[in-house]
Amino acid sequence: MIKLAFWKKKATGFSKNSNVRDIKSQKCSRCGKYKLIAFYADEYGGVKGLCKECRKEIEKTRELFPI
């Protein structure tokens, strides 16, 4: 009997030698870097996708509401 095994490739990213960015990361609305982001609405109704560092800086001057 011959057993065949098929493995699915995880969709978490590409090889480390590749110049292509990680699939899980998205572009931050403020700094423009590809990082893990969370979406927030400001007091004017605008939606922003912010990384942790940018969120901390913006929360000092504006109120953010998580979506």
Image: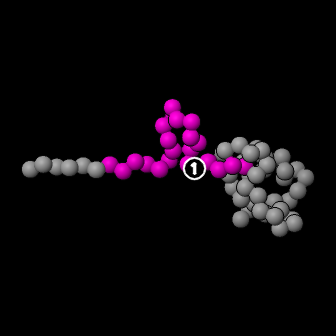
Residue 61 in sight in this render:
yes
Q: Which residue is depicted at the point 12% across and 48% down?
A: 2
- Magenta part, dominant SS: loop
Q: Which residue is depicted at the point 51% across and 32% down?
A: 17
> Which of 63/7 is in front?
7
Residue 65 in sight in this render:
no
Q: Which residue is depicted at the point 65% across and 50% down?
A: 26
Question: Looking at the picture, which amino acid does disc 1 mark?
Answer: Lys
Farthest top residue in view: 17
Residue 19 placement, left or right of 26: left
Q: Give the range drawn in magenta.
A: 7-28
Residue 57 x, y percent position in the rendering: 83, 46
Residue 49 x, y percent position in the rendering: 73, 55
The residue beneath circle 1 is 24
Vertical placement of residue 59 versus 18, above or below: below
- The stretch drawn in magenta includes residue 17: yes
> Which of 35/63 is in front?
35
Residue 59 x, y percent position in the rendering: 84, 52
Q: Which residue is depicted at the point 87% across and 66% down?
A: 44
